[in-house]
Image (cartoon, grey):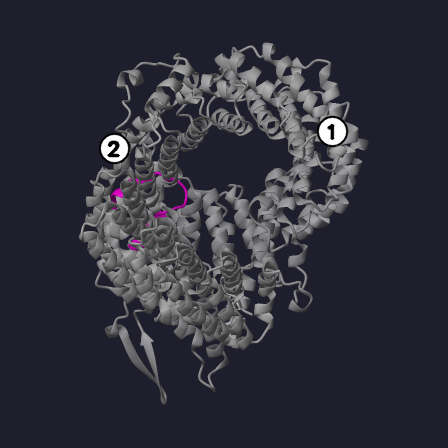
Amino acid sequence: MRITREILLAPLVSKVKEPQVETMVDTLCSNMTSDKEQLRDISSMGLKTVIAELPLSSSGLTLTVSVCKKITSQLIGAMGKQDDVSVQLEALDILSDMLGRLSGALVSFHGSLLSSLLPQLTSPRMAVRKRSILALGHLVPCCSPALFSQLTEHLLTELSKGPPTSNTRTYIQCLATVSRQGGHRVGEHLEKLIPMVVKFTGVEDDELREYCFQAFEAFIRRCPKEMSPHVATVTQLCLKFMTFDPNYNYDDTEEEEDSMDIEDGLDEESDDEYSDDDDMSWKVRRSSIKCLEALISTRRDLLLSFYSSICPTLLTRFKEREENVRADVFAAFSTLLRQTRVGSSHHGLILVPAIVKAIHRQLKEKSIKSRQGCFCLLTELAHTVPGALEEHIPALIPGIVFSLTDKSTSSTMRIDALTFFHVLLLSHPPQAFQPHMQVLLPPVVACVEDTFYKITSEALLVTQQLVRVIRPQGQAAAAGGFDPKPFVREAFSVTMKRLKATDIDQEVKERAISCMGHMVCHLGDHLGAELQGVLAIFLERLKNEITRLTAVRTITLISASPLKTDLTSILPEALSVLGSFLRKNQRALKLGTLACLTALVTHHAASIKPAALEPVLSELPALVDETDMHVSQVSITLLTCMAKACPSSLAKISSSVLPGVFRLVHSPLLQGGALVAIVDFLQALVLSKTSNLGYSQLLKSLTEPFHSPQSPADGSVIHRQSYHSVARCVAALSSASPKETPSTVAGLIQEVKSPGSPEPARVLALLCLGEVGRSGSLGGSKEVQGVILDAFTSTSEEVKTAASCALGSMAVGSLKDYLPFLLKEISAQPRRQYLLLHSLKEVISACPASSLSPHVESIWALLFQNCECQEEGTRNLVAECLGKLTLGNPAQLLPRLKQQLKAGSPLARSTVVTAIKFTIVDHPALIDSLLKDCIGDFLKTLQDEDINVRRVALVMFNSAAHNKPSLIRGLLGAVLPHLYKETQIRKDLIREVEMGPFKHTVDDGLDVRKAAFECMYTLLDSCLEGLDVLQFLDHVEEGLKDHYDIRMLTFLMLARLVSLCPAAVLQRLDRLVEPLKATCTTKVKAGSVKQEFEKQEELRRSAMRAVAALLAVPEVERSPSMADFANQIRSNADMASIYQSVQGGEGGGPTESMDMS
């Protein structure tokens, strides 16, 4: 009956009034100290239920606080009852629950709780000590800094007295828990703590040593920066104690010899001989290895030294006799490899032969845990250094085969072995496996027949790769000479059995189809009469909704096979089914089907009867639409293949497809791959000569919209992108019909000259002339030059810009005719300089360096004549031209740019630094190695006396950090102080400007600060490991109080930092909360303009996003200042609504961390 009452308490807490809850709690607390054990147990269950149900929201906060106070005072009394241990244990248990959930409500009790918990650490009962440590762990994150120091000082004082070993163990264990829970707060006490813990590792007590290493691990994970001075000491201790095994003598000679043939029974016997139930040394070894793993995972910057200090010792520990410890050794080594994979510069350090030598014997161990560890490590190795295991494959194969065939092997073990084998096959060439096929294929085939579907599924993946080994295609096939015949039947029969089965798991069905597809693709000519049966099954699977996508991909693979498999038996029906898929709403199926049809039309056009294509043709027009550009692109690629392979079929639908194509050409969304696809299609259409639309009709359809009047009301205004798309298409048609080019060019020239032409038509005609000229079709026509020069005098900015683009494009097509003319005009026409420099930029960007080389000197001289222009826009264009010119010939031109740094005025220096920005591209380039050597000299301009030079230096640094972080990683130590200096507000750059009766403040340093904060934001993504995050946060904190633009940036940075390094943010939390709170609670003055309201609202939303990111970190609300702010948000309707809208806009978020009820 009583138990039922306790269960009913849960809903009661939230329903009854406050006095009744308090009465219930009073009764439960007095019953908890009763002599009757049953009553005591039930009451403690009841109290735990009440604590779990107490409301966290602001409305129920008063109830929660008063109940907590009642329970806490009673519990403190109960803890003092030394005579009854079970009451103490229950009290500690309830206290832990309460501190874990409601610590914020107990702030006033924290001091008295600490005072009552500390004496319990010396209790004669170990269970009491352990629960006290647990309760202290829950108290630590949210207590005040003074209390935290009191606790740490107490532990230090007690440890310095040299207490009995059992007490020392408790204190060190408590220290590890406090560090894990309190995180960064331990950092300031580490200087005193570390020597103390180091000293206790020397005490001959295995449990104490284990706790010492657990404390080290907690320090490393929670305070990586503060631990830096102690890393060497801790590493040495770990290396010493990870080999600590006093009761066992590892025979070194056995390690040297290859003793794989020793009977497993003997090994087991010798293990038993030395095993001892009282031997706890394995705990010391395990905790020291876990500590090393923490070091490896938190200090990527020390990776290089880890390979010389930690790696060799870890390798020797692969022979560890204790299974659990050995698993941790493998895990630590895997972490080392994973960290290396993240930064690919250290691959050369990995000692692959030593790893394989140490591990291959373990692959035949009886211990399943060890073998799993080996396979995980080897999988990590294959991912980290693809191809590195090639020469070691003969040593690894026996281990793989053993795990696949051994009767005692578990299913998980087989799956791990198959997974590793699959990774091995993917990352190494087929020739490495061919000599071993007789050994490898039978066990994999046996796994395909396994009754457990997961093993079958993995084995089919491996078989698929083995098929590629048996008979590779492409370059690998050229090195052939391997006969696949002996293996075909064995692999085919088991796969066929799985392919036919319909009552099997979905994953197995899909992988059987895919595996058989690879067999037909690679070995189709060896399947003989079986082939038609396989194709018939594929057709069946194509009609099945569950397997159709896999079947589509498989047919795509087979149709593109170099074996040219005969598909006539299934083609008509397959085409009909594929046509129906184009109507489906499943995008992946649609794209797969289009790829499949393209492969069929390209490789099997001769076998396709025109009537068979009808179901496909009728569906294509609807797919050419701007709502899905990728589907449109793939559809147009299919149409292009049809225009080449079966033009008669295309002629039937040209009238329905072309309007969609033209709509796409005129769409502002068209660019990149889709535009290239349309250009190819139009050329194929003209060349096929079967279309009922010839060259002139296509040309007319493309240009028609530009001649009709445009009005924004009916949406007929043409977007700027459409002009460029149509110009590309016109040039493509012209190159496909060279006979028509002269008349087309004459028409375009007439269009530009004609005073009656509408402006859009003139702009288009100029761009078309440029694109036609890009292919060299215009020659050095004087008439065209005249037309371009006339266009430069137009009153329309659009026409002038189009003329500039056209001149650049023509010069690309015919350098000798147009480049001298262009350079002459730049010198002679200062008023048109900006437009002409745009033309020159186009030439430098599009022409290969070899064809530009005769003109480099004259271009270089001309650019430097204009590098001190007062107009910043012109200077930026000059800089872009200089940068792109240097990209083409870096060895010669980069040193000359460097020289200009010393010679020029501030304007010239800013142009040179901006030019460097344009040499940093986001793909590998010849200039990279040269730039890496001298970018430091260009970055010295961060110390330039001219503020504008410093600003462009920051922009250049930002570009390097974003596009090629490898250029600047090594320079961060020298650059960051100057970067951080630019984030500070400088009073001498702030001035007052009088505007009539008003005074207005102007901050000339704002742009530089903005550039500096933008660099900081970029560094978070590209060079996080090179940053001292706490120093970085100091400047973020200053930015949170700066100008609107900078605050917006720092809120973003703060949210990013929370996800990247929460521990560091928690360390600075109390200082970060204030500026966030100030922004969220600021109100705009009444009577302010609308823009002010909007700016402030956007600021508050941005700050609230940072708050939401912070509240997603579980430990955040343990900070009293953050808990206060969270309560303030909950209780303020305005802030609560912003918080909820921010969370809703970001797809959920940490709702559970903040109850808004």
Q: Is residue 919 magenta?
A: yes
Q: Residue, x 42% and y 15% (percent of image)?
A: 265
Q: Is residue 435 above or below residue 695?
A: above
Q: Residue, x 69% and y 37% (percent of image)?
A: 593
Residue furthest to the right in view is 611
The tag earlier along the polypeptide, 1 or 2, is 2
Query: Relative to residue 1005, is residue 625 drawn left or right?
Result: right
Q: State the residue position of label 2.
A: 308
How far is disc 1 from disc 2 in space, using C-alphas? 55 Å
Indicate the position of residue 978 as horizontal and vertical percent values.
24, 58
Q: Identity of the amino acid at label 1?
A: Thr
- Quadrant into which the C terminus falls: bottom right
Q: Is residue 14 above or below residue 433?
A: below
Label 1: element kind: loop
Indicate the position of residue 864 as horizontal and vertical percent values.
29, 54
Indicate the position of residue 669 as horizontal and vertical percent values.
59, 54
Q: Nearer the viewer, residue 647 or 434?
A: 434
Query: Relative to residue 512, is residue 897 drawn left or right?
Result: left
Q: Nearer the viewer, residue 519 or 992?
A: 519
Q: State the residue position of label 1.
A: 502
Residue 257 position by quadrant = top left
- How many numbered discs, if any? 2
Q: Which stretch appears magenta?
A: 913-934
Residue 1016 position by quadrant = bottom left
Indicate the position of residue 801 as horizontal and vertical percent values.
49, 59
Residue 908 image label: none
